[in-house]
């Protein structure tokens, strides 16, 4: 046994294995350095700064859990947290629900040329920069000269204050997000649909199953792993919403459309309270992890793997 282990160790440290090991480390070194610099390092720094009072100009001082205690009395924090949760629920539901419906419709019998044209049309917004899209939608949402209110006026609807109303501002951001990201959800759902065997649909057709029943009893269960992936990725993305709000409403009116990430940015780089911003960042990380864990735990009841 000892002789075998010694031989294995000798083989592991042989010149050939050492060369292969060094070559492998060199290949993965850029990824490891990038992870250390842009992921692990900032995460460790966030944890450390969350326990300190630090304004970027003077030396940080240790304050223990004071930043976390301050969050309990911060009413604006709970307001923006509510905004973020509201945005996540409706943006994720819109992106995933509409993306799956579009994928099912575009997967029906039609010429390949028409399919490619529709997919390109819906996927195109995903390729355009978010800031550029937000600037365009800012003009579309204008009360007096916006295109949306113009068409609403043609059917007798009074002009809507999309961006200046506390009731509508967050909905405007949700509409923009769905328009921007539904194409990506549609593309992923289409790939999931095309992986489902045609035999299931042939059997359903022989049994005389209706289109709606086939959708709920065959398409949805077999597409459930793809739907879980879309729910997870869109939820994580929704909690990080920032750029579209900055351009579209700047968080207003008041705090009506301010998100948690935007609040973190303001606390860190406008109020220069990096300690408090770091503590809120950890709160956001904790919420994201908990929501993702709940999604995976509940998926055992509805996600089906062949």
Image (cartoon, rainbow, N blue to C red):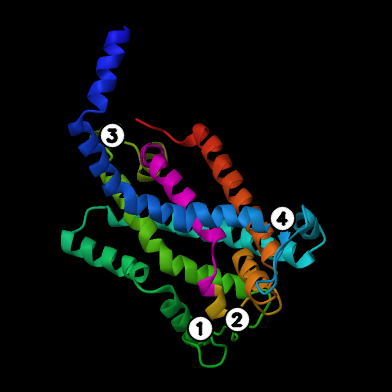
CB within 8 Å, label 1 to label 2: yes
Q: Earlier in the sequence, mark 2 or mark 3?
A: 2
Q: State the separation of the CA atoms marked 2 and 3.
A: 47 Å
Q: Earlier in the sequence, mark 1 or mark 2?
A: 1
CB within 8 Å, label 3 to label 4: no
On the question of residue 234 being in view, the answer is no
Q: Is residue 257 magenta?
A: no
Q: Earlier in the sequence, mark 2 or mark 4?
A: 4
Q: Position of residue 24 (x, y in %)?
A: 26, 42
User: What stretch of residues is rendered in magenta?
Assistant: 218-244
Which residue is labeled 1 in the image? 138
Question: In the drawing, does residue 248 fall left or right of residue 71?
Answer: left
- Label 4: element kind: loop
Q: State the separation of the CA atoms marked 3 and 4.
A: 57 Å
Q: Position of residue 6 (x, y in %)?
A: 29, 15
Which residue is labeled 4 in the image? 51
**Mark 2 neighbour class, 10 Å CA radius: few under 14, some 14 to 19, many 20 or more:** many
């Amino acid at each position: 046994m000892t002789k075998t282990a010694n031989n294995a160790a000798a083989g592991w440290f042989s010149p050939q294995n050492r060369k292969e090991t060094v070559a492998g480390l060199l290949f993965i070194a850029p990824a490891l350095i990038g992870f250390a610099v842009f992921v692990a390092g900032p995460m460790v720094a966030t944890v450390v700064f969350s326990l300190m009072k630090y304004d970027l100009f003077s030396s940080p001082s240790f304050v223990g859990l004071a930043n976390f205690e301050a969050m309990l009395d911060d009413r604006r924090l709970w307001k923006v947290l509510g905004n973020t949760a509201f945005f996540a629920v409706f943006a994720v539901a819109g992106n995933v629900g509409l993306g799956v419906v579009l994928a099912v419709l575009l997967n029906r019998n039609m010429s390949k040329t028409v399919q490619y044209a529709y997919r390109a049309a819906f996927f195109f917004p995903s390729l355009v920069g978010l800031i550029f899209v937000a600037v365009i939608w800012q003009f579309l949402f204008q009360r007096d000269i916006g295109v949306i209110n113009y068409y609403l006026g043609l059917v007798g609807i009074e002009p809507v204050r999309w961006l200046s109303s506390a009731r509508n501002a967050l909905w405007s951001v949700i509409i923009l997000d769905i328009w921007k990201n539904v194409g990506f959800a549609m593309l992923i759902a289409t790939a999931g649909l095309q992986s489902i065997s045609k035999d299931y649909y042939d059997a359903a057709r022989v049994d005389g199953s209706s289109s709606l029943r086939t959708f709920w009893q065959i398409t949805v269960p077999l597409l459930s792993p793809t739907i879980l992936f879309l729910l997870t990725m869109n939820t994580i993305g929704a909690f990080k919403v920032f750029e579209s709000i900055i351009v579209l409403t700047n968080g207003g009116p008041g705090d009506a459309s301010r998100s948690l990430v935007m609040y973190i940015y303001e606390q860190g780089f406008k109020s220069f309270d990096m300690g408090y911003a770091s503590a809120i960042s950890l709160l956001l990380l904790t919420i994201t992890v908990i929501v993702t864990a709940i999604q995976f735990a509940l998926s055992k009841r509805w996600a089906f793997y062949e």
